Image (cartoon, rainbow, N blue to C red):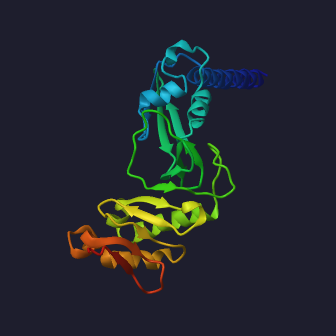
Amino acid sequence: MNEKKSKIVGTMFFIVLISCILYLSFFTSTKANKGKFEMIELTGNYLLTETDYLAFTRLTELSKYENMTLPIIKDRLLKHPYVRRTDIEFNGINKVKVSLVEKNIVAILIGGSEPFFITDDFQVVPIFPNTKFIELPVISNPGGEKKITPLGLLMTKDIIEAFKIIEAAKQTDYKIFKSLSEINLRNGSEIVLTFSGINSPVIFGRGGEAKKMIYLESLWENLVNDSGIAVNSKYIDLRFADNIYVGMEVKV
């Protein structure tokens, strides 16, 4: 009988102990996710400063929000058009650590009065004040009937062509890629490229991106150096198969 009572008491004690542990775990978790966070530490940001990101998300004075939680902080940051994903954690004291991954910006898009970024998955992203600009080519005059809509997708035939040109330049010669200033789609007409360091426009045409970039590479050093071609050429034409045509300025 005494042995039976001992087992019952032991079982009850075990249940109470487990209940206390679960309660404390829940209480600690709740406190960490709903409490007085005092500061946010942001890493992984390049396009905007930590201050600009927090101002957009209204998280600059975090200690004022008594009911702030980690999911709310994460959700607000993910709503910024530059942000692709976030990892967020609480240090257990007063600081929230956020690791940002920004969207991969491919080019600056100009199709009207307002410029936009365009990402590697063809999303049109508005450009915010104080953005730190990186060296990006400009895609201009995309034309077409599809309207440019902020945060919408612009996966038209012309934009895909521009992306292929950018990738071909990158794969052929990184110097050519870094010098690529503008891809003028000319509203569906023959594409014209502009490169920094070269006075002559390059009439690129359409299709055959990789082959044309290799042809351009073969002429590149003569174009960027003060050779006769660089000084006297009016344009470089890559539209014709296996040939490069250089329009020379004729002095009379």
Query: Residue at coordinates 20% horizontally, 69% vertically from top-left?
Result: 226
- Image quadrant occupied by the C terminus: bottom left
- Give the percent coordinates (x, y) of residue 126: 55, 40
> Which quarter of the picture shows residue 160?
bottom right
- Image quadrant occupied by the N terminus: top right
- Give the percent coordinates (x, y) of residue 211: 45, 79
Q: Is residue 137 above or below residue 165?
A: above
Q: Is residue 138 above or below residue 12?
A: below
Count how many numbered circles sit on residues in the image: 0
Pick the front one: 41 or 196: 196
Pick the front one: 109 or 36: 109
- Give the percent coordinates (x, y) of residue 101: 49, 44
- Give the percent coordinates (x, y) of residue 63: 50, 15
Q: Is residue 138 above or below residue 217?
A: above
Q: Residue furthest right?
A: 1
Pick the front one: 191 or 76: 191
Q: Is residue 131 above or below residue 148?
A: above
Query: Residue at coordinates 71% horizontally, 24% vertically from top-left?
Result: 15
Pick the front one: 85 or 47: 47
Q: Is residue 23 left or right of residue 227?
A: right
Q: Residue furthest left?
A: 226
Q: Residue furthest front?
A: 252
Q: Is residue 130 left or right of residue 31?
A: left
Query: Residue at coordinates 61% horizontally, 30% vertically from top-left?
Result: 71
Q: Residue furthest bottom?
A: 242
Query: Residue at coordinates 47% horizontally, 38% vertically from top-left?
Result: 99
